[in-house]
Amino acid sequence: MAGAQAERYQRIFSTIRDVPAGCVASYGQIAEIAGIPRGARQVGTALRSLPQGHDVPWHRILHSAGTIAFPQGSRAFREQKKRLEAEGVPVLAGRVDMRKYRWQPDLDELLWKPGPAWDER
DNA sequence: CTGATGACTATAG
DNA sequence: CCTATAGCCATCA
């Protein structure tokens, strides 16, 4: 099977795939749900390694303050903003209103499938 | 192994 | 709101 780090990446991507369209999450939030405390940077690292053709909704991941991680005007920035607005998430001054669009998974959703946060069981 | 890097974050001024 | 700083930790050269 895969090494520990590959498995960690899988948990990160899996968690991100759980973020529904029209919602967003922060890097730290994804890390925490994926069972990686203080792993915000690692979420960014994992996303950076994504190959082409992946199905991970990377555009729904933002800084904890709701800002897009890329420099304003950069290609990635425009792409992310475009994708977010395409699914109804407004981006003003490079920022999303986290109070309104932050994804808040409920218990059922977390239990839906095997979650790393519950691996101890 | 060592040091630099970065799609992070919280805090302080 | 902004910049600066200090933690953070997997990756990479």
Image (cartoon, coloured by chain):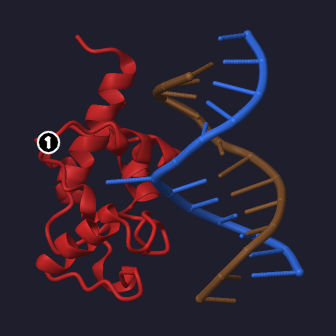
Chain colours: A red, B blue, C brown
Q: Residue at x 33, y 45 (%)?
A: A47
Q: Which residue is mark 1?
A: A54
Q: In the shown orientation, is residue A3 left or right of residue B3? A: left
Q: Residue at x 10, y 41 (%)?
A: A53
Q: Position of residue A51 (x, y in %)?
A: 21, 36
Query: Foreground: A117 or A90?
Result: A90
Q: Position of residue A1 (x, y in %)?
A: 22, 10
Q: Tell me which corner region of the image, top left, top right, bottom left or bottom right, holds residue A66.
A: bottom left
Q: Residue at x 26, y 86 (%)?
A: A90
Q: Element under label 1? A: loop
Q: Position of residue A27 (x, y in %)?
A: 42, 56
Q: Chain of mark 1?
A: A
The C terminus of chain A, quarter of image: top left
Query: Foreground: A33 or C9?
Result: C9
Vertical side of A11 occupied by A61: above or below? below
Q: Residue at x 42, y 63 (%)?
A: A70
Q: In the shown orientation, is residue A28 left or right of residue A87? A: right
Bin the neighbour count of mark 1 within 10 Å (Cα to Cα): few under 14, some 14-19, many 20 and up.
few
Q: Amino acid at mark 1?
A: His
Q: Position of residue A21 (x, y in %)?
A: 14, 68
Q: Tell me which corner region of the image, top left, top right, bottom left or bottom right, holds residue A98.
A: bottom left
Query: Foreground: A49 or B9?
Result: A49
Vertical side of A80 occupied by A43: above or below? above
Q: How many numbered badges does the structure rendering display? A: 1
Is there any visible trace of residue A121 in the rendered image? no
Is there any visible trace of residue A17 in the rendered image? yes
